Image (tube, rainbow, N blue to C red):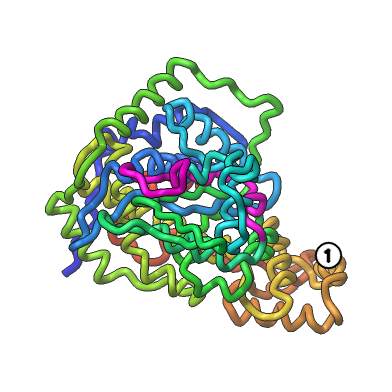
């Protein structure tokens, strides 16, 4: 028999790091989920390899790869930049430079010959963060946090080789052998315990231009959590200034994590029992495009458990932490197909994605002739739109509503309710983004 969900006392979850962060920020135009995941990635990067969960003969570290996806104007960049500023104030320094880092990485990956003594290469700190100034293995782990609110500025489009490299570094764990790469000019680079964290921002359209459809089954995207967000509707012509005392208190808590959340982190027995049940019972996402992700879901969950323990200023993973981590992950998974849109599907998937966006902005049925005006320039024939609408209907994404009175017939979005699936160890009331969506 499956264990029931443990109902947490609200007093026990008050003032964890996430709650304090939302209190610090106040009301913003950025969605709560963008703020939450920006902070999650920052905590994971801050911890780096200082703490880990023993996993058989290996270790799992809390570094995360996350891409916040939403249409232009969602204010996702605001959330990303704010979290980066707060982390920098907590004396975190190994950020990747957004532009020059990209060039240095690409020269390495593409096998271009370059002179390590030239200003062109030494001008960026990120390679030194990874490889050391002389390009040889050191005694300290090399870490870098890629924070790019416009991710397509960081990496060139459709560069599968670069994406594959980042995928391989997500869970590198070898205390004895460095990660090695040989350049075209025969110079070898040896990186001691590389630790990469990624916090990126993107629109669905730019995401499609960044990753070719075949990247779906590639390792990088299965390690990347896609965080979908929508505009909040909040309008603040001038953002509120942060309370300096609250900001200082928050930064002190981040520094406490850096100094004290160290070494092996263990489960409590109730938490391990819950993890075991989730491992054995959680089903893959219905969307087959996420099959590679589903095979790594338990690793994403463990990383989140470590981050939630740090956020609660605990040095063990208890039932409270696994419930919060599984809730955060389940909420993201519900919207991940929406974040991906029609990426990787059939021909005209960009038009299909546009149709879904049109329907997502209204609760009233949308007539076909209204859609034609918007998407016709991207179609060869009007019949193609009918085929797309039939495909989306068969996929249970949209539905036809008959005319009623003065309301014309048309299509509406067929949304699934959050929490419709597995409710085991999930409590959505813990999430501000869930409460905001319901209010």
Please, what secondary structure does the residue beneath circle 1 have?
helix
Query: Does residue 174 lie above or below 373 as drawn?
Result: above
Residue plotted at (48% across, 30% down): 88
Q: Residue 257 location in percent, x, y?
A: 31, 33
Judge from the rendering whether residue 290 lies leftward or rightward of residue 275; answer left or right.
Answer: right
Judge from the rendering whether residue 410 lies leftward or rightward of residue 321; answer left or right.
Answer: right
Q: Nearer the viewer, residue 286 or 437?
A: 286
Q: Quadrant of residue 277?
A: bottom left
Judge from the rendering whether residue 354 lies leftward or rightward of residue 155; answer left or right.
Answer: right
Q: Residue 322 location in percent, x, y?
A: 27, 51
Q: Can you see residue 417?
A: no
Q: Quadrant of residue 394?
A: bottom right
Residue plotted at (17% across, 57% down): 272
For the record, the magenta segment spans 130-156
Q: Can you see residue 395?
A: yes
Residue plotted at (45% across, 55% down): 189
Disc 1 target residue: 374
């Amino acid at each position: 028999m499956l264990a029931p969900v443990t109902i947490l006392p609200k007093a026990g979850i008050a003032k964890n790091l996430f709650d304090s962060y939302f209190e610090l920020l106040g009301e913003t135009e950025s969605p709560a989920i963008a703020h939450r995941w920006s902070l999650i990635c920052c905590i994971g990067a801050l911890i780096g390899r200082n703490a880990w969960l023993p996993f058989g003969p290996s270790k799992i570290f809390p570094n995360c790869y996350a891409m916040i996806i939403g249409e232009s104007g969602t204010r996702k960049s605001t959330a990303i930049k704010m979290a980066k500023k707060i982390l920098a104030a907590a004396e975190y320094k190994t950020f990747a430079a957004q532009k020059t880092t990209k060039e240095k990485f690409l020269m390495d990956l593409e096998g271009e010959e370059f002179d390590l003594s030239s200003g062109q290469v030494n001008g960026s700190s990120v390679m030194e963060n990874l490889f050391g100034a002389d390009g040889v293995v050191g005694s300290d782990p090399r870490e870098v946090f890629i924070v790019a609110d416009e991710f397509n500025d960081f990496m060139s489009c459709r560069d599968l080789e670069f994406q594959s490299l980042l995928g391989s570094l997500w869970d590198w764990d070898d205390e004895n052998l460095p990660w090695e790469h040989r350049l075209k000019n025969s110079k070898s680079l040896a990186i001691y315990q590389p630790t990469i964290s990624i916090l990126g921002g993107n629109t669905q359209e730019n995401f499609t231009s960044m990753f070719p459809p075949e990247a779906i089954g590639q390792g990088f995207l299965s390690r990347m959590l896609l965080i979908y967000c929508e505009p909040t509707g909040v309008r603040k012509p001038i953002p509120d200034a942060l309370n300096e005392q609250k900001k200082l208190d928050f930064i002190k808590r981040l520094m406490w994590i850096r100094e004290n959340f160290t070494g092996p982190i263990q489960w409590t027995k109730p938490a391990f029992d819950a993890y075991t049940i989730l491992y054995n019972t959680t089903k893959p996402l219905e969307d087959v495009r996420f099959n590679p992700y589903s095979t790594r879901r338990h690793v994403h969950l463990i990383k989140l458990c470590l981050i939630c323990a740090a956020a609660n200023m605990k040095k063990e993973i208890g039932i409270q932490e696994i419930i919060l981590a599984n809730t955060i992950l389940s909420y993201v998974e519900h919207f991940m197909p929406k974040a991906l849109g029609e990426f990787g599907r059939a021909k005209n998937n960009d038009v299909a994605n546009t149709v879904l966006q049109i329907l997502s902005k209204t609760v009233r049925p949308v007539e076909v002739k209204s859609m034609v005006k918007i998407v016709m320039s991207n179609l060869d024939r009007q019949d193609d739109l009918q085929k797309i609408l039939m495909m989306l209907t068969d996929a249970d994404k949209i539905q036809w509503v008959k005319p009623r009175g003065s309301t014309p017939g048309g299509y509406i979005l067929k949304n699934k309710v959050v929490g419709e699936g597995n409710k085991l160890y999930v409590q959505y009331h813990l999430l501000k983004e869930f409460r905001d969506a319901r209010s």
